[in-house]
Amino acid sequence: MTASEPGRREFLAAATRAAVAASVAGPVLSACAGERRPPAAGLEPELNIYNWFDYIGPDTIAGFEQEFGVRVTYDTYESNEEMLGKLMAGATGYDLVVPTGYQLPLLRERGLVARLDRSKLTNWDNLMPLFQRTPADPGGEYGVPWQWGITGIAWRTDLLSAAPESWGAFLDGSASGRATMLDDGREVLGAMLRYRGHSLNSTDPAELAGARQDAIKAKADLLAFMTLALKGQLASGDVAMAQCWNGDARQAQRENPNIAFTLPREGSLIFNDYMVLLRDAPHPAAATAFLNYILRPDVGAAISEETGYGTPNRAAQERMRDPIPYPTPDELARLEYQRDLGAATALWDRIWTEVKAAA
Ligand code: N2P
């Protein structure tokens, strides 16, 4: 026994007493917080947000609720198509949703999106110039850039003998029965198009037929198409190799450091996701206050720290301990933004349905 041990024991006992006191005080404190202050001037008392899963900071919502006196209902989805399907069915009651850039023009065409009131977005200039005007929103009028990311291959360095450097790894049995691809037709067919040297926005029926064939071949060897459950399965080792977004790979790395992430040599996609205000939003003032709130440097930094995705916010980036670096020119040359497929959407949908149904 060393002389410091009793001291340490006392310290632990005191710490335990403090923790017990805090846990007793906790509910009392939150009961006080439950008597929420009235909404800030001109704001509705509620706000309904629909966002991707695991795509926000731990205190983003609570911080807004406390400061602005607005109660937030927060729902999540796994794909752009899931979100769009819900919006098209109508009357969702949502105020804010987070589409990927390629969906913005489509949402606008369908009259689903409201123009931002930029006079109220006083934190807008915290955004990097690169994100103030983007191909998906050239005037910076319809969406507040939320996060950016890329799709690549996450893999277990302790379970595979070599880095999967090509989308072909899903076709050559590199991780037979322990590989997954995203449950997302744009992602899977997009990767197979890149594998064959085509654009991931191809609308050429012959190119798409090739991607369909590869996707069906890959599927026979996959554990599953998987999106939401992926991080846990990568961390546990049930999945050794996965088509994955960079931020979700970083989140999984926190659970298990033997996870690496590679951008395949044939290239892949880069995305900007935007938070947009819906045209029939029931709470437009609270929604606009939320948009301005997420543009704050500390709020933006906390979102990016938690999600592992890149922040479009320069002021937030400067505050981060471990900021996600924007792709190098070399990487950018291999990255492509998705575009709306227009009339070819029906063909893509049909092919993806066939891939999902294939044995
Ligand atoms: C899910 C975030 C994914 C964003 N965690 C893909 N656009």
Image (tube, rainbow, N blue to C red):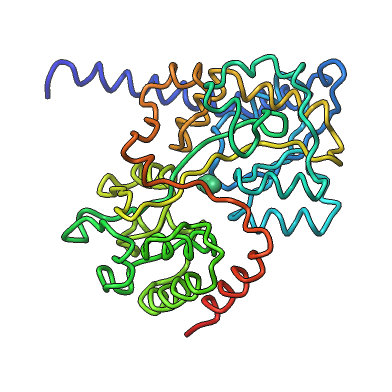
Task: Report the number of discs.
Answer: 0
Q: Write the residue at 32% across / 72% down.
A: 171
* Residue 132 against residue 217 in the figure, above or below: above
Residue 192 location, quadrant: bottom left
Horizontally, residue 185 falls left or right of residue 176, namely right
Residue 340 to residue 60: above or below: below
- Comparing 179 with 136, the one in front is 136
**212 with respect to 170 (left or right):** right
In the foreground, 51 or 332? 332
Eyeballing the image, is 258 above or below 145?
below
Q: Position of residue 143 (x, y in %)?
A: 68, 34
Position of the N terminus by quadrant? top left
Q: Position of residue 203 (x, y in %)?
A: 56, 64
Residue under the image location 54 percent in, 64 percent down: 185
What residue do we see at 39% from left, 19% from top? 14
Q: Is residue 276 toward the left or the right of residue 328 in the image?
A: right
Horizontal relation, residue 24 to residue 175: left or right: right
Q: Residue at x 33, y 55 (%)?
A: 266
Q: Position of residue 256 (x, y in %)?
A: 31, 47
Q: Which residue appears farthest toward the left when viewing the image?
A: 1
Instruction: Give the percent coordinates (x, y) of residue 177.
Output: 33, 74
